[in-house]
Amino acid sequence: MRLVILPAILVLGCAVAAAAPGESPLKISLSDTLLELQEGNSPVLQYKYRSVPFKPYAMSWFTPKGVNVLRDAPEDHKHHHSLMYAIMLGDINFWEEIPEAGRQLHRTFANVSVDPKRAGFTETLVWQGPKRGKIMLFEQRRLTHHLTDGGSARLLTWQSELKCPKGEERVTLVGKIYHGLGMRFPVFMDKVGSFQFAQDETGAFDDGPHHLAQASWCAYTVADGEHPVTVAMFSAKENPRPTLWFTMLEPFSYLAGTFDLSRNPITLEAGKTLTAKYGLAAWDGIVDNETVQALYEQWQKILENKDNKHPRKAKEHAS
C-alpha cells in the first residue's frame, strides 16, 4: 500500500491526489473554487474554498447511493452554508453574514492525500476582523474521508485547530446556542425527521423550539419515501469539553455541535491552541441506535490508531 501526497496545486481542474492504480477507489481533484473527493465514479464531498462570501465550507456531502444531505444558502437563512464551522470572537460575529461580520479566508492547502482507506486535506485559514483586516485567529482545518466496512456508510472527520495569534494576549470564543459545526439539511429532510442521542445523554434542556443535550453523538433520521437517510455527528473524546448538541425541527431542521459557548465562553491565550474534532456519518435508510453507536466506536478507534496519522507532511502551496 502506498500513500501519495501531492502539492495541492498542480493543474486546476485535474486530479491532484490519487493512490497507485488498483490500491484505492478514492481520488481528489481541485478547481479554482472547489476541492472534490470521489469514491470510484461516485461523489463524496465538494468543499468550496473560493468564491465564498464569508467562509469556506463543505458544500455537498453524499450518502453511498449519492444523496446529498446538505443545503447551501437557503432563502430563509442565506448564511447557512451546508456544513460549516463558525463562532464569535468577542463581539465579532463569524456566523451571520452582515457588514460588520468577520471573515474566514482560505490561505493554502497542504497534505492533500489519498491511501487505500482514507483521503483528505489540510487547509490553512485566517479569521479576519472587519476593521483594517486584523487577524484574530489562525485555523488549521483537516477533513478526512474514511472508507467503512462494506461501504454501508459515509464517514468523515472534521478537525479545526484554532490558535490565538502572537502579539495578542488572548481571544475569547463565544457564540449563540447554535454556534459551532453546523449542518443545514435539504428540503426533503426538513421538519419531518427525528433526533436521537447516545445513551450517555446528559445536561438536556429546551430553549423554545430547540432541544440541546450533551452526548457522545447525535443522529437525525428521515423516513422519506424516495430517499430515507440517517445522518449523525460524533464528538471526539479528546475535545476540550463535552459537545452540547443543538437540534431543531421548526421552522427548518438543523443540527450543530457546540462547546456551549453562549453560557461558557473559552479564553484562548496567546500562542495556545484549541482543537474541535467531530465525526460525521451518513447512511441510506433508517438505522438503529446500535448501528450508530457501532460506527461511533469504530471512528474512535480510527482516531486512536497511530497509523491514521499521515507519515510525512507535504510542503504548503498557495492556492
Image: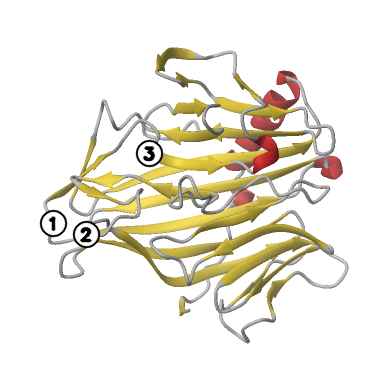
**Quadrant of residue 240 within the rendered picture:** top left
Left or right, residue 291 beside residue 164: right
Q: Amino acid at mark 1?
A: Glu
Residues at marks 2 and 1, CA–CA distance in whole angstroms: 6 Å
Q: Give the mark toward the camera: 3 or 1.
A: 3
Tell me, for residue 165, which label it has, or none. Answer: 2
Q: x%, y% of residue 66?
A: 79, 51
- Quick check: can you spot residue 296? yes
Tell me, for residue 168, which label it has, or none. Answer: 1
| Position of the N terminus by quadrant | bottom right
- Quick check: can you spot residue 120? no
Q: Amino acid at mark 2?
A: Pro
Q: Secondary structure at mark 1?
A: loop
Identity of the residue drawn at 76% across and 20% down: 288
Q: x%, y% of residue 237?
A: 49, 30
**Sequence-first disc among 3 and 2:** 2
Residues at marks 3 and 2, CA–CA distance in whole angstroms: 22 Å
Position of 5 relative to 275 (above/below): below
**Quadrant of residue 283 within the rendered picture:** top right
**Sequence-first disc among 3 and 1:** 1
Residues at marks 3 and 1, CA–CA distance in whole angstroms: 23 Å
Please report contact status of discs 3 and 1: CB closer than 8 Å, yes or no.
no
Tell me, for residue 179, which label it has, or none. Answer: 3
Which of 128 and 4 lies nearest the eye of the viewer? Answer: 128
